[in-house]
Structure formats: C-alpha cells, structure tokens
Amino acid sequence: MAVCEHLVEIREVRPSTTQGCTECLAIGGQWVHLRECLSCGHVGCCDSSPNRHASAHFAASHHPIIQSFEPGYFKSLVFALIGLQLRGVVEGIDTGLGALLTTGSP
C-alpha cells in the first residue's frame, strides 16, 4: 500500500473557530459545509459554498490536507499542488497510526 507524501503535513491542531467558517463569520457570509486544515487548524467553507474559503486558504498557505469539520463525519482530502482541484480522497492510506477512512456524507 502506498503512503501519501502529504501525510507529513498533518499536525495536532485546534480549530480556528467552532462557530463556522472563520472568514464567513467575519464578513457575514454563509457556508454549506466546513473544512479544517490539518496543518494549522484553519476552518473554512467548502467549494460548494459561495466564498470557497478552504480553497483560498490552500492557495495562500499550501497546506495540502483538510478534513470535514461536520459533527459525526470524518473525511480527509488532499489538495492537488497544481491548481485548486482536489486530487482525491485519502482512503485506506497506511499512516502507521491506522487507516484514514471516508464515512458519512458531507
């Protein structure tokens, strides 16, 4: 099983907020789903949201791994380093700490 080279970017983080998208809260924006950066804890809105703050955070920081910040749901995503397209879902990757699995639906 291959090991994703981006896994070294994962840190033990605290979310920048538990109330919603950091930037949307500041500007009065709305979001569909939330994503948390696993390098620094930034909480931003997903690409289905009008402002796409999680993608903007990746563009500015180059932090490649995010996870859903929805209660009861765990999904980790790796941003492609070329453009702002998602490279894919990190599923069944051997981290040495157990597998990252996708479950649920946001």
Image (cartoon, rainbow, N blue to C red):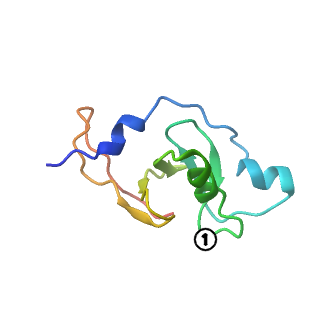
At horizontal 54% and vertical 44% (from top left) the residue drawn is 37
- Left or right, 62 with respect to 22, comes to left
Question: From this viewpoint, is residue 38 visible?
Answer: yes
- Left or right, 20 with respect to 73, comes to right
- Left or right, 46 with respect to 96, comes to right
Task: Name which quarter of the figure residue 49 lies in.
Answer: bottom right
Where does label 1 land, which residue? 48
Residue type highlighted by circle 1: Ser
Of 97 and 64, which appears nearest the observer?
A: 64
Question: From this viewpoint, is residue 70 visible?
Answer: no
- Where is residue 67? Give x, y as percent: 48, 49
At horizontal 13% and vertical 49% (from top left) the residue drawn is 1
At horizontal 73% and vertical 47% (from top left) the residue drawn is 22
Numbered disc 1: secondary structure: loop
Of 85 and 90, which appears nearest the observer?
A: 85
- Where is residue 77? Give x, y as percent: 42, 55
- Where is residue 94? Give x, y as percent: 22, 42
Q: Outermost residue, left direction?
A: 1
Q: Image height check: is 13 above or below 77?
A: above
Q: Image height check: is 61 above or below 12?
A: below
Query: How many C-alpha atoms fall within 10 Å of the one at disc 1: few (<14), some, or many (≥20)?
Result: few
Task: Name which quarter of the figure residue 98 lies in.
Answer: top left
Of 43 and 57, which appears nearest the observer?
A: 57
Q: Image height check: is 72 above or below 83?
A: above
Q: Outermost residue, top direction?
A: 12
- Left or right, 89 with respect to 85, comes to left
